[in-house]
Each structure stands twice: as structure tokens, then as C-alpha cells.
Image: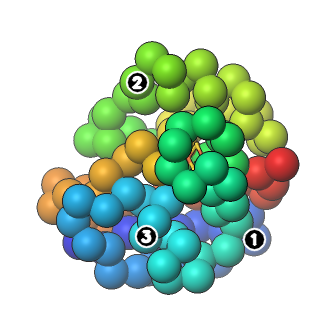
């Protein structure tokens, strides 16, 4: 399964992701810049913010209730496709998904 990370400058990194792994872990293990993930995936930091591209929002699904609350605390203003990437699990239906990395996480 591949995941595309778009940086604020428009550059795109495509990485091979393991199914069952979060997009946050996928970013860290591939040294994709811009994902801080201070809490290590515990849903308590909101520094793993990504914006799922329009075409993929419906497939990635909505945030859970608590994630939705946490998204109000992101550094960059949340957008309709905003998710906390530690809560998005890679699976074959997401093959080719593109997420945008916000300009800041703090
Ligand atoms: Fe902290 Fe996702 S890594 S909320």
C-alpha cells in the first residue's frame, strides 16, 4: 500500500506503507518531515496533524469523537480533511492515498 505525503512546498514523497500501521508511524519510519507525533500515538498531542486530500476523505473516514475534539487544538487551522495521522490505519483500500502535511505542528 502506498501513501503520498505532500509537503507545504508542494513536493510529494511516496512511501510504501505496511497495512495495519498508522500513517503517523509510516511517516516516522520513512523519515517524512513535518509529522512530530510527540505523544507517540496516544491521541494526546495533536502534533501528527495531516489533511487528507479531497478525493480520499470519504475513504479514510471521519475522525472519532475524541480525535475530532483534539483537532480543534492543532497548530494549523483544521480543514475538512483534517485527521490525526496516528488514528488513520493503512489498509489496501487506502492504496495511493494522499495526505498534506501542515506547515507547522506546534
Ligand atoms: Fe499524538 Fe497522534 S501522535 S495525537
Per the model, the C-alpha gap separating discs 2 and 1 is: 29 Å
Location of residue 25 by image quarter = bottom left
Q: CA distance from mark 2 to mark 3?
A: 20 Å
Question: Which labelled disc corresponds to residue 26?
Answer: 3
Residue at disc 3, secondary structure: helix
- Residue at the image position 78 percent from the left and 41 percent from the top: 76
Upstream in sequence: badge 2 or badge 3: 3
Give the percent coordinates (x, y) of residue 23: 42, 59
Camera-side residue: 47 or 97?
47
Q: Position of residue 56 (x, y in %)?
A: 35, 47
Q: Is residue 48 above or below residue 15?
A: above
Q: Please state which of the two labelled residues, at mark 2 or mark 1, is closer to the viewer.
A: 2
Among the two numbered marks 2 and 1 on one chain, the one whose residue lies closer to the N terminus: 1
Label 3 vs label 1, nearer the camera: 3
Q: Which residue is depicted at the point 83% across and 48% down? A: 106
Please tell me whether mark 2 sits on a helix, a strand or a loop.
loop
Cβ atoms at labels 2 and 1 below 8 Å apart: no
In which quadrant of the rendered view does residue 79 lie? top right
Q: Nearer the viewer, residue 58 or 44?
A: 44
Q: Is residue 56 left or right of residue 30?
A: left
Residue 52: tell me if it is visible.
Answer: no
Q: Which residue is mark 1?
A: 9
- Image side of residue 86 versus residue 50, left or right: left
The N terminus lies in quadrant = bottom left
Q: Give the residue pinned by disc 2.
A: 64
Taking the spot 64% from the left edge, 62% from the top edge, the residue there is: 35
Question: Which residue sits at x=80%, y=54%?
Answer: 104
Q: How is the image coloured?
A: rainbow
Distance from mark 2 CB to nearest ligand 1 atom below 8 Å: no
Amino acid at each position: 500500500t502506498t501513501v503520498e505525503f505532500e509537503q507545504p512546498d508542494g513536493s510529494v514523497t511516496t512511501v510504501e506503507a505496511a497495512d495495519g500501521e498508522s500513517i503517523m508511524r509510516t511517516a516516522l519510519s520513512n523519515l517524512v518531515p513535518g509529522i512530530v507525533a510527540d505523544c507517540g500515538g496516544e491521541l494526546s498531542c495533536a502534533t501528527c496533524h495531516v489533511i487528507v486530500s479531497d478525493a480520499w476523505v470519504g475513504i479514510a473516514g471521519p475522525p472519532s469523537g475524541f480525535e475530532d475534539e483534539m483537532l480543534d487544538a492543532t497548530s494549523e487551522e483544521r480543514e475538512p480533511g483534517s485527521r490525526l495521522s496516528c488514528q488513520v490505519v493503512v489498509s489496501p483500500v487506502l492504496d495511493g492515498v494522499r495526505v498534506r502535511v501542515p506547515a507547522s505542528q506546534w
